[in-house]
Each structure stands twice: as C-alpha cells, then as structure tokens.
Amino acid sequence: MKKVYLVHRYPAEVDKKVHELGTAGYSIKYLGISPANLRSIKKHPPAAVIIDLTHAPSQGRDMGIYMRHYKATRHVPIVFAGGTPEKVAKVREHIPDAVYTEWRKVRSALKWAIAHPPEQPVAPDSLLAGYSGTPLVKKLGIKPNTTVTLIDAPPNFDKLLVSLPDSVKLRGRFGSKNDLIIWFVGSKRILQDRVIDISRRVGNSGLWIVWPKKSARVSSGLSQKVVREAGLNSGLVDYKVCAIDQTYAGLKFSVRKNRRRPSLSAV
C-alpha cells in the first residue's frame, strides 16, 4: 500500500478525503501546515504528497517549494488540489510540473502522478518565505537576553528588527558573545573567502548567511544552492530558510554536533 501525505490547513475537513483515498488503496497520513511537518516529509518521503490550495494557497505553495529544494523529496510527485484559478496560476508559476486538479478528481490525478514522477523536477529559485505576517525577529529566531552580531549588514537593517525581545544587544562586529550571527554576503567570492573563518566563530550559536535574491537584480553569483554548499563544506548544516525582505533571503546554519567547540572571540 503506497503511503501518501495529505497536507491541509484544517483537520476537520480531511476525514472524508482520507477515507475516500484510503478506499482507493492508499495509506493516507494527514499533515497540517507547520515547519515540523515539512521536516517529516523530508525525513520520510512518501509515494506522493497532496497539498490543498483551497485554504492558505501561499503556504501550500511554500510546502511544494520546500520539497523541491531538497534531494530527498525533489522527485516526490506533488498533487495540488482545489484553489481558485488565479491562486492556482500563481502556484503553477513556481512549480509548473506538479499535478493540478480539483478535489473531486484527486483520486485519478494521484494515480497518474505516482505513475509519472518528475524526471527532471523544477527546483524553484525562490524560498520558503515562512508564514505570512510572521515578524522578522521571530523568523530569525532572536531570543531574549541574547547578543545578535550583524556582519556587513546594509544600512538601517536594524530598523527592520522591530519589537526586539527584552535585553537583546545588536553589535556590528564579533565579540566574546555571539548568540546569533547574521552575515550578509554580496558575492560568491566573498562567501568562499570568508565562510570558513565565519563558521569557526559560530560555536553553539546559529548563523544566518544572507544574500541578494535574483529578483533584486543584483549580480552576485549567489543562490540558495551555492550558499548551502559553501556552508556544508565548512562543517555547518542548514536547517531553516526564510525571506528577509524583498531584497534578501537567508539560510540558517548550525555547527555539526561532532564539530562543536567554543566560539572564537574577536581578534
């Protein structure tokens, strides 16, 4: 029996859908829209994923984009179900080779999608932006009583960090305490030249590597793939991605557990 994940915002609406798909010979597991469930899809890839576009279509789109950005789930068939024509068209711009259907036709669409998994799946050059309306401070994971080190940040970036938690300190250079590092990178050369040195300063804290998105029309040679590979090659592991604003995107890294050591202070 093939395992299929059904992603839907409202659990009260999925019981009938789960039953109908189950009678068609599938093992259906319901997943709500949350970062934890995104990780579940990556850790245990199914035969296919059905994503509802009737409610919160932008979040459904982000789930699909997330799947396409990771090798473990890139070839998993995606079936988008429901949604208005206008919303569906916007999702299709990002993931044109997914299967799009109405809910009343989802069984036949699912059968076709599993029989025809994408051979060369499109990996959109856009990011899981997080959930609409989430404050930037929360997306970045800034906690109370921490020191946030901003490296090569653009002018007035600190003005975007509104409603900071209590006792948060912002600094523009490395110090003896760097609870969270946010490093803005303007080119592939700078990334390659400095990533090892920056990674040595992370210790047990987190590191955001931030770069200009292609939509910002900045010639940087950077992309999510380039940034991820540079981080992995320097002993880091990525675990979160978000859009900072209209210009910048970021990947969050931590040091692999077997390589952690006290962070270096400024020299």
Image (cartoon, grey):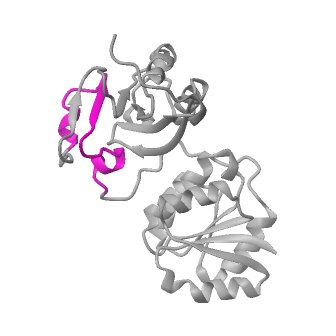
153 is within the stretch colored magenta:
yes
186 is within the stretch colored magenta:
no
Q: Residue visible at 58% across and 87% down?
A: 15
Which quarter of the image is occupied by the N terminus?
A: bottom right
Outermost top residue: 267
| Residue 110 visible in image | yes
Q: Is 120 drawn above or below residue 101 in the view shown?
A: above
Nearer the observer, 150 or 126 = 150
The magenta segment is: 134-161
Nearer the observer, 54 or 16 = 16
Residue 223: horizontal and vertical position, in percent? 51, 32
Outermost front residue: 262
Marker count (numbered): 0
| 250 sits left or right of 115 in the view | left
| 164 sits left or right of 230 in the view | left
Q: Is 231 drawn above or below residue 16 in the view shown?
A: above
Q: Is 86 drawn above or below residue 229 in the view shown?
A: below
**Quadrant of residue 142 in the image?**
top left
Nearer the observer, 119 or 149 = 149
Q: Is 94 drawn above or below residue 115 in the view shown?
A: above
| 84 sits left or right of 43 in the view | left
Residue 71: horizontal and vertical position, in percent? 68, 45
Q: Residue visible at 71% across and 72% down?
A: 110
| Residue 126 visible in image | no
Residue 140: horizontal and vertical position, in percent? 35, 44
Q: Residue visible at 23% across and 33% down?
A: 157
Residue 165: horizontal and vertical position, in percent? 21, 48
Q: Residue visible at 70% across and 70% down?
A: 4
| 179 sits left or right of 117 in the view | left
Which quarter of the image is occupied by the C terminus?
A: top left
